C-alpha cells in the first residue's frame, strides 16, 4: 500500500516487532541485574519496587507486568542463577557429564566445578529467600519451600542417574545419594565457608568434590 507523503509516494514502514521485543528483553535484564544488586545489598524488605524501577530506568508498571512484584523478581533471579555462567545451561551440562562419565572421581570433581560456578549466583539468592521467609513474609516462605523441593527433586534425579550408571560404591540407596548431593550443595555451606570464612569459590568446589568422593565413591576406585 502506498501512502502519499509531501506529494510523493512512499512505502509504509512495517511495524518492527522484533526491535520492540529486543528493547523489552534488554529492559527486563536491566531490572533483574538491578534487583540482584539492591536485594543483596539492602535486603528484601528494605527494597521497594519504586526504587528498583527508578534505578533500572523503567516504570513500576513494567516491573509488575513482567515479574508480578518483588517475590516474582526473586523467583526470576533464582531461575536465572540455575543456568550458570556458561552458554549452555548448567543443568544440561550436568546431565551430559553424568551420561558420559566412566570415572566416578572425575564426575565428582566435575560436580565440584559446577558448585564453584553456580553457588556465587544461586546461594546468595537462596539465603535472601531464607531470611525473608524467616522475617514472616508468607510469599517468600512459600518460595523457599518450592526452591527446596525443586532442588531436592533435582538431586534425586542425579542420584538415580549416577546409581544406574554403576559409578558409586555398593549399598547406597537413591535417598542416601540424594541427601549427600543436597547437603553438599546447600546455600548454608556456601554461607559458612565463603561468606563467613572467606573461601574462594574454587576452594568451595574442590571441598564439595572431596565430600562427594568421601561419601559416595568406593575408596578402591
Image (cartoon, rainbow, N blue to C red):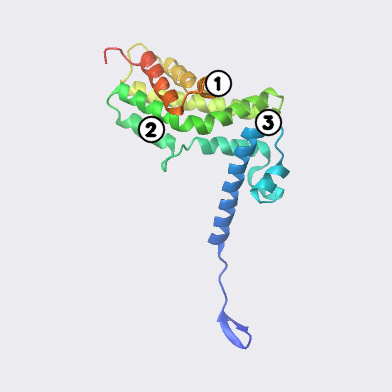
Q: Is residue 58 left or right of residue 164?
A: right
Which residue position holds label 1?
196
Circles 2, 3 touching at the beta carbon (< 8 Å): no
Find numbered disc 3 in the image and state the secondary structure of the residue it sits on: helix
Which residue does the image show at 43% across and 36% down from the upper left?
90
Q: Position of residue 12 (x, y in %)?
A: 57, 76
Q: Residues within 10 Å of mark 1 (few under 14, many from 20)?
A: few
Which residue position holds label 3?
139
Find numbered disc 1 in the image and state the secondary structure of the residue it sits on: helix
Q: Position of residue 97 (x, y in %)?
A: 34, 31
In the rendered image, the vertical position of residue 210 relative to residue 40, given as above or below: above
Judged from this view, the residue extending furthest toward the bottom is: 7
Report the front residue among 121 and 219. 121
The first of marks 2 and 3 along the sequence is 2
Q: Position of residue 82 (x, y in %)?
A: 49, 35
Report the front residue among 96 and 123. 123
Q: Residues within 10 Å of mark 2 (few under 14, many from 20)?
A: few
In the rendered image, the vertical position of residue 220 relative to residue 187, given as above or below: above
Which residue does the image show at 47% across and 32% down from the upper left?
118
Q: How many marks?
A: 3
Circles 3, 1 touching at the beta carbon (< 8 Å): no
The first of marks 2 and 1 along the sequence is 2
Mark 3–mark 1 Cα distance, whole angstroms, equals 28 Å
Q: Is residue 166 left or right of residue 65?
A: left
Amino acid at each position: 500500500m502506498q501512502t502519499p507523503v509531501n506529494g510523493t509516494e512512499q512505502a509504509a514502514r512495517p511495524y518492527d516487532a522484533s526491535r520492540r521485543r529486543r528493547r523489552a528483553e534488554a529492559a527486563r535484564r536491566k531490572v533483574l541485574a538491578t534487583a540482584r544488586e539492591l536485594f543483596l545489598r539492602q535486603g528484601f524488605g528494605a527494597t521497594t519496587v519504586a526504587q528498583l524501577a527508578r534505578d533500572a530506568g523503567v516504570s513500576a508498571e513494567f516491573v509488575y507486568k513482567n515479574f508480578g512484584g518483588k517475590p516474582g523478581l526473586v523467583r526470576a533471579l533464582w531461575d536465572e542463577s540455575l543456568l550458570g555462567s556458561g552458554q549452555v545451561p548448567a543443568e544440561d551440562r550436568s546431565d551430559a557429564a553424568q551420561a558420559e562419565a566412566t570415572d566416578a572421581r572425575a564426575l565428582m570433581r566435575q560436580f565440584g566445578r559446577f558448585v564453584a560456578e553456580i553457588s556465587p549466583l544461586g546461594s546468595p539468592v537462596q539465603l535472601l529467600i531464607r531470611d525473608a521467609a524467616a522475617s514472616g513474609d508468607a510469599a517468600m516462605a512459600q518460595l523457599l519451600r518450592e526452591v527446596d523441593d525443586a532442588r531436592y527433586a533435582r538431586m534425586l534425579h542425579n542420584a538415580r542417574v549416577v546409581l544406574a550408571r554403576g559409578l558409586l560404591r555398593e549399598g547406597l540407596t537413591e535417598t542416601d545419594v540424594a541427601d549427600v548431593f543436597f547437603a553438599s550443595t546447600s546455600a548454608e555451606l556456601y554461607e559458612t565457608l565463603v561468606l563467613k570464612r572467606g573461601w574462594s569459590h574454587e576452594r568451595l568446589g574442590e571441598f564439595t568434590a572431596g565430600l562427594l568422593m568421601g561419601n559416595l565413591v568406593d575408596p578402591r576406585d
